[in-house]
Structure formats: structure tokens, C-alpha cells
Image: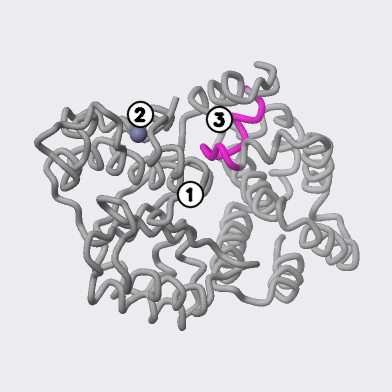
Amino acid sequence: MSGFASIIGQLHAIGALTRLIDNHRIPNALLFTGIRGIGKRTTAVAFASAYNCVSDTQSPSSGNNGPSTACIDGRATPCGSCSSCKKIENGQHPDVILIRPEKSEIVIDQIRRLLQILAMKPYEARLRVAIVTQADQMNSFAGNALLKILEEPPDKTLLILTAEQPSNLLPTIVSRCQQLRFRPLSRSEIADILTRQHGIHANQAATIASLCGGSVGKALEMNDPGWLEWRDWMLDTLCCWDRLTVNVRLGIGEKLLASPTKLDQALDMLAYWRRDMLMAKFGKTTFIYPDKVNLIIQAATRYTVSDLIACLEEIHRMRHYLSARGNPKLLMDNLMLKLA
Ligand SMILES: [Zn+2]
């Protein structure tokens, strides 16, 4: 399965993209927003394939000036086997350019290289597609350089940006892009992907699907060996959080920072645990950690509602400053000390 057909749960975005192709109304720039791991980059690549597919279903009258009939008939389905589709699939198409953060950010040299490429004509594509993933990780120099592309759009070129936090992008960039929102996937969609596409056992898939917040990317990280043990350690720690000494808390912060792939999930867990305690306070039973319900109810008696809300705000602030590339060590120490 290739193209849009392989993307699960994003019917709204794919419908909008299909209409752009059908109506031959390709904007200069698109911005795909939504949490990570829900198919933004895959959809951008599928769009490039759909528009540039050169399979023999192509209409004789369309020549090389328009998308193939596979797109014109509204299915927007690339064949997956023509030379264009194969090159795009293998990341070897000269006119489908992918830029992603090097280490933790996108720097000006990467955007300068892109400018040099876009100054030339496309090699062979009907529509050249430059995809900048995690564009919210661009530093301000790179962002300003990218703005030049938006102000003077190159011929036969579409720029697609993907971002989890569009608020971190320059407003002048956002305002020049047509924005498409991608939604988190439902638990059943995630469980289905895990079992069908990744061969994960149904029970394990159901547990992970309930914890990953609708992100396939997170779900796959959670399937790593040792993840469930790590989750249990986190939850045991959270159960007795208010009884931990300052030194122990700072040590926990260090341990969390030492594993950057789990940091995002750790912050989720710090927040979800307090969210569950709030639910307990209000007599609700919709818990994110239903397997820990007795411990949650017990722990909730030691907190006030305003304590819990203040903690959630603190975690939210930490996320914001981290995404704005603040000093992780300082931020984590601060969070460990402030969380009630
Ligand atoms: Zn094709």
C-alpha cells in the first residue's frame, strides 16, 4: 500500500490535499500541524508521489504539464512502481527534498543549501516538493532565511512545513502558508496499526494504544524492550512523590534527562498522574492509569485541587521552554523542585 491509502486517520487533511490536486490549485506553501508521530511527513511525501506519478494511466492530453490521471480522477493514488514513485520512496528523487533538524535544530546552512537548490529549475518533476519537517525547530536565522523562499516562491515548487508547535514559527511564515491540521489517532486506529503493520500482540497493542496519546511514533517507542518496566518505575516514583527528598528528586530529573527519547513520555506521565489525581478529587473514574486506581485515590488525599493545577501548569511551562530550546538541566532541576 502506498500514497494516501497508507495513511490512517487523517481523512480531513487527505481530503483537502486531494481537492488541491483535483482542482489544480497548488499553493506555494503548506503547513501541516499536529503532535509528532501521526503521519505529517508521510503525507507530505505521499503528496509529492501523487502529484509526480508518471505511470501509464497518465492522460495523453495532460502531457507533462499536469498530474497523472490517477490524480485527476480524484483518487490521488500514486502507482508506487513508476520511476518517479520508486525514486521518491527511496529518498532519491532530485526534486523531492527533505530537511530535518540536525541534532536538535534546523540551522541557517541547511536553509541556504535549500535556497541554492530552489534557485535552479526542477530536474524532472512536474512539481518540486521541499519538505521541512519539525520546522518549529528552526532557529531564528534559519526562519528568516526560509522567509525569502515564501516571499519569492520558486517556479513549480511547493514548500511543505510540518510543525508540532506552530506558535514557535515566525508569524510571517505561518501567515504565508495554507495550514492543515492533523489529528491524534484514536486508540483503535493505533492498536490496529500496531497489530497489522508491526505484528505486535493484541494485548500489548491495546495497552500501548491507551498510553501513547494518539501518536504512532510514541506508540512504537513504547514498544521498545524495557519500556513497560520503565513505566512501572515512573509510576512507583509518582506514587510517593510528595515523600521524596530534594536530592532524590534531582537525581530522578537527571535520570530522565539522560534518556532524551523518553523525556517527552516522562513529562506526559508527570502530568497524567496529576490529571488522574484531579479526576479522583472530583469523583470521576476515567483514569489514564486504571491499573493504579487505588494508589491514585490514596495519593490524591494528600493534595489540594489548586496544588495539582499548579503542578500541571509547571509541567506545561517546562514543555514550552524546552521547545523554545531552553537549558534542559536548569529546567529539569526547576521542575523537580517545584512539583508538589
Ligand atoms: Zn507512479
Q: Which mark is residue 77?
A: none
Q: Earlier in the sequence, mark 2 or mark 1?
A: 1
Outermost residue toward the top?
Answer: 202
What quarter of the picture does the N terminus occupy?
Answer: top left
Q: Is mark 2 within 8 Å of ligand 1?
A: yes
Tell me the amino acid under the disc marked 3: Thr
Front of the two marks 3 and 2 = 2
Q: Which residue is mark 1?
A: 35
What quarter of the picture does the C terminus occupy?
Answer: bottom right
- The stretch in magenta equals 206-217
Q: Of helix, strand and loop, which one carries label 1?
A: loop
Front of the two marks 2 and 1 = 2
Number of residues whose C-alpha sits closer than 10 Å to that of mark 2, classed few (under 14), some (14–19) or many (20 or more): many
Is 215 inside the magenta-drawn segment?
A: yes
Number of residues whose C-alpha sits closer than 10 Å to that of mark 1, classed few (under 14), some (14–19) or many (20 or more): some
Q: Is residue 33 left or right of residue 210?
A: left
Would residue 8 be seen by someone viewing this image from the given angle? no
Residue at 51%, 68% in the rendered image? 137
Q: Of helix, strand and loop, which one carries label 2?
A: loop
Q: Position of residue 136 (x, y in %)?
A: 46, 66
Q: Position of residue 67 (x, y in %)?
A: 21, 41
Q: Earlier in the sequence, mark 3 or mark 2?
A: 2
Q: Position of residue 325 (x, y in %)?
A: 59, 73
Is 52 inside the magenta-drawn segment?
A: no
Tell me the amino acid under the disc marked 1: Ile
Decide: marks 2, 1 in contact (CB < 8 A)? no
Which residue is nearer to you in this view: 303 or 9? 9
Q: Which mark is residue 286?
A: 3
Q: In terms of image quarters, where does ligand 1 lie?
A: top left
Q: Which residue is mark 2?
A: 79
Magenta span main SS = helix
Q: Position of residue 106 (x, y in %)?
A: 53, 71
